[in-house]
Image (cartoon, rainbow, N blue to C red):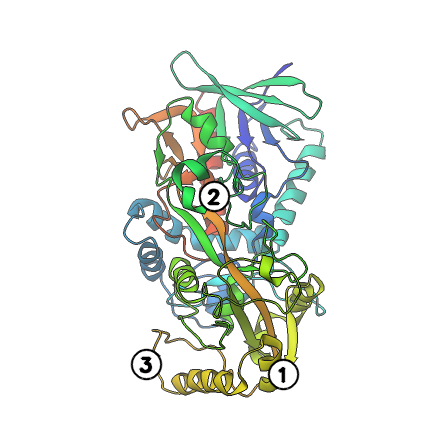
Amino acid sequence: MTTRANIVVIGGGLAGMSAALEALHQTRNAAGVSVALLEKETRTGGNSAKASSGINGVLTRTQKAQRVADSVRAFARDTERSGHGRSNETLVRKLAEDSTAAVTWLQKEFGLDLDVLAQLGGHSAPRTHRRPEVGGKPQPVGWGVVGALAERLGAYARDGSGRFRLETGAHVTQLLKASDGGVAGAEYTTANGARHRVRADVVVLATGGFAGEGARPGFLREYAPQLAGLASTNGAFATGDGLRLASALGAALVDMDQVQVHPTGFVAAADPASPTKFLAAEALRGEGGILLDAQGARFVDELDTRDRVTAAIFRHCAAPDTCARHNSTNAGQGPSAAAFLVLPQAAADRFGLGSLGFYAKMGLVNRAAGVDGLAAALRVDAKVLRETLDAYDAARSTSGQSDAYGKSVFPEAVAAAEAYFWGVVTPVTHYCMGGLRFDIRTRVLRAADGAPIRGLLAAGEVTGGLHGANRLAGNSLLECVVYGREAGRQAATAVKAL
């Protein structure tokens, strides 16, 4: 069966939905223009729905309301520093410059209350926006954002105009090649095995990364074999589909060996060997959580960049006497490197007790009364633990100076809390910095000559070059909105020019 849509978006995560919505907005007065979104899963959202720490933005109404001093230049500098010199500066500059509009779009157009700010690892100012708890219940930022956009797309699909259609369970198997080497549509299969073709003027790839491949053959084993088999926060659907589709047409790949390992994936006491881990949000450390080894000692600046915190855990928490574990009969089946994540009551209040309660119901977070109770729960020497916590607070009281681990931002005191919340965390594959080479107009570039492949755009984790060697926390959702919307604008412009 063959159908037609002027613009086809492949992938229903935040980047794909942003692209589709922007394309629909930009073509609202163009008669007969239609948009189709193909998603291989049974529902939209992808890994974007799991995002928990927030979305970055500078000069937003939230920053202004809280009198945060920040700038586009500072944000771009932090992003480039996190990427260790490998980031494309032009792509970074657009990300930072468009961050205000991206957060404002979500706040004004969709009524999202992105009113909580945190300063996460690698940031020089509080600029990561998330949602507040309501009535003691958490509002996960990723879930809320993709839910709002999905609701709007659903309204388009039901309005009877024929301008938009969403097809789930649609696994794209190849891009249709035009006679000039450009893209002319896509071929896909549905759950019943039927093959379909959709002809299009423009195709937008928003299929995500490949960190969900695990130990299966694929890009992870090819480009980062040392990470194959490591537990992941990704869904099993994250298998690099878009990279294969575009590569078949000669698209260039960049930084494919750069796969981010997030330092803190929760280890569940009931199933420590599970290959899929629930992310311990960056905001847990941003609001004052600290990391301890199995001896009760700190070993890292908890607000350093993800790659450095990850390296510290592998370096300091991988020996039998330093690897943190739950006190359970199957604890030995857990990861070979793990740390304790500990939040004093004040940090827990800042993060949100509702969210911590959600983690607790999943068996990921526990509560202990006072330092002695925490020492008993972690099975560490109470004297050593007290010395660790006292040293932290002593460094906190020394204004403007860094401690022995280079930490200079201390959100909360930790030594005299009435209660502590704790869990076991381990490094997990989380995000792919590498992907399709693209430009600020989201055009996918050809490997042979660097020229754009006509009719092929891309946005989100399927692309590479923006984040360099390490993505800065909070830039994933932002990337999806900034470049997803840009892809929608470019697609609309191309169609209207025909």
Residue drawn at (50%, 58%) of the image: 336
Tell me which numbered mark, 1 or 3, is placed earlier along the sequence: 1
Measuring from the top left, give residue 254's x and y in whole percent: 34, 37
Q: Can residue 110 be seen here?
A: no
Residue drawn at (51%, 45%) of the image: 229
**Label 2–label 1 contact, CB within 8 A:** no
Label 2: few (<14), some or many (≥20) within 10 Å? many
Tell me which numbered mark, 3 or 2, is placed earlier along the sequence: 2
Q: CA distance from mark 3 to mark 2?
A: 40 Å
Measuring from the top left, give residue 342's x and y in whole percent: 55, 73
Q: In the image, which disc is placed on residue 373?
A: 1
Q: In the image, which disc is placed on residue 401?
A: 3
Left or right: 95 as drawn, with respect to 358: left
Which quadrant would the C terminus be assigned to in this image? top left
Tell me which numbered mark, 2 or 1, is placed earlier along the sequence: 2
Left or right: 70 as drawn, with respect to 199: left
What amino acid is labelled 1 in the image? Gly
What amino acid is labelled 3 in the image? Gln
Instruction: Label 2: state its secondary structure.
Output: loop
Of residues 443 and 339, the one drawn nearer to the viewer in this rendering: 339
Instruction: Label 1: state its secondary structure.
Output: helix
Residue drawn at (61%, 67%) of the image: 326
- The correct choice, above or below, for 239 with respect to 364 in the image is above
Instruction: Label 3: state its secondary structure.
Output: loop
Which quadrant would the N terminus be assigned to in this image? top right
Label 1: few (<14), some or many (≥20) within 10 Å? some
Left or right: 475 as drawn, with respect to 88: right
What amino acid is labelled 2 in the image? Ala
Q: In the image, which disc is placed on residue 228?
A: 2
Q: Can residue 47 be seen here?
A: yes
